[in-house]
Image: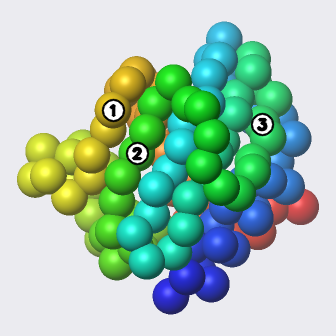
Amino acid sequence: MAGETRALFERAAEVPFEPRLRDVHGTVRFEVAGAGTWRVTVDDGSITVGEGAGAAECVVRIEEAELRRLMRSEQNALTAFMQGRLAVEGTPGLALAVCRLLMGLSTAGSRG
């Protein structure tokens, strides 16, 4: 469901600052087959999220069904990567940091 994926990135857009991402800088573009493309930019803990393609230091490509499995903690991101279900181009550490943020949001629900 593209709506579930969109809701995840909308929740991320509601997080203006994440202390766990201090000292992290860069943009990750998520290309979610079947749902769309989003960019998550982190600048020393400050987070901005935008929809659509654009420049990024890291690109994560994943099928929507696999992303839902990650969101529901039915799959581990590292395992998905090793099995070829999640592709990362660029800076893997940046991708991992942002993925942890997203997975935390998906299991915690809406923050506020």
Compared with residue 59, is residue 92 higher up or lower down, i.e. above or below?
above
Q: Can you see residue 104?
A: no
Q: Residue at x 85, y 55 (%)?
A: 14
For disc 2, the neighbor class at 10 Å (few under 14, some 14 to 19, many from 20) is: many
Q: Nearer the viewer, residue 69 or 49?
A: 49
Identify the residue under disc 3: 47
Q: Nearer the viewer, residue 56 or 49?
A: 56
Earlier-in-chain disc, 1 versus 2? 2
Please provide percent x and percent y for residue 21: 66, 26
Real-space Cα distance between discs 1 and 3? 21 Å
Identify the residue under disc 2: 60
- For the residue labelled by badge 3, is the local secondary structure a helix, a strand or a loop? strand
Compared with residue 66, is residue 83 higher up or lower down, i.e. above or below?
above
Q: Residue furthest left?
A: 83
Identify the residue under disc 1: 89
Q: Can you see residue 40?
A: yes
